[in-house]
Image (tube, rainbow, N blue to C red):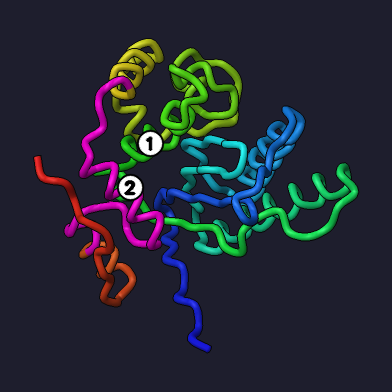
Amino acid sequence: MVPREGRLVIKGCPHHVIQRGHNRQDVFSTDEDYRYYLDNLREWKEHLGCRVYAFCLMNNHVHIVVDPGAREVNLALLMKRLAGRQTRFVNSRDRRSGTLWEGRYKSSPISTDEYLLSCCRYVELNPVRAGLVSEPMDYQWSSYTRKVGGRGYEWLDRDPVYLGLGKTVEEREARYLEWTRQAIDEGELELLRQSIQHGGLTGGSRFVEEIAGRMGKRIELRGPGRPKK
């Protein structure tokens, strides 16, 4: 048996994380399910010292943009706690057994300067792409409502790129709203999808070189690379 390739996790770096329901089955079926997951996300990100910059809970999968903080292992610990607690909660209520999730979550380290804002937009526009809502602010179970409108999720961390959009809350909200209404470049969209699918870096060649230097090993740039302008 060929051993699984180790997941690339970098401390102090934001990561795009996806975890799907087992066989694409629904993970959330009631409002209580969504709230329970988010309560645990808030509790464990604070306990482990992680920073959560964006999230979106869909019926059969979750997206989270999270910085594991001072230890790489924090990402695995966070996802283990979230998955385990949700499974026990649903199984107990529905009097069922077995796994709720796919075997492994997928993750991709993100170049902050190049793609962090783009990745947050990609995550928060999931309900729009799925046809659930026409505007991201109409979807209750994502971080967008906090960034534009300031509703709920006070525990959400402000990422440095979002903070750089303006000096005031009003400026940041207005510019982020404008940003999320812009058409997403197809090359950028493909990079975001391929990076998370293959567990590579969400960034260009310079980011790859930087991370390779920090880790002391060669890293392949998986996916199509940075889109041309």
Tell me the SS state at disc 2. Answer: helix
Left or right: where does residue 164 sit relative to residue 170? left
Q: Which residue is under mark 2? A: 192
Return the x and y of residue 30 as percentages of the image width and height: 74, 30
Q: Which amino acid type corresponds to the residue marked 2 in the rendered image?
A: Leu
Q: Who's the residue at 40% across and 52% down the image?
A: 13
Q: Secondary structure at mark 1?
A: helix
Name the image quarter holding the C terminus: top left
Give the left or right position of residue 229, taking residue 74 as reference: left
Q: Position of residue 175 (x, y in %)?
A: 30, 17
Front residue (pair 225, 40) = 225
The label shown at residue 122 is: 1
Q: Residues within 10 Å of mark 1 (few under 14, many from 20)?
A: many
Q: Is residue 205 magenta?
A: yes
Identify the residue shown where x is 51% and y is 50%.
18
Q: What is the crowding at mark 2: few (fewer than 14 residues within 10 Å), some, or many (at least 20)?
A: many
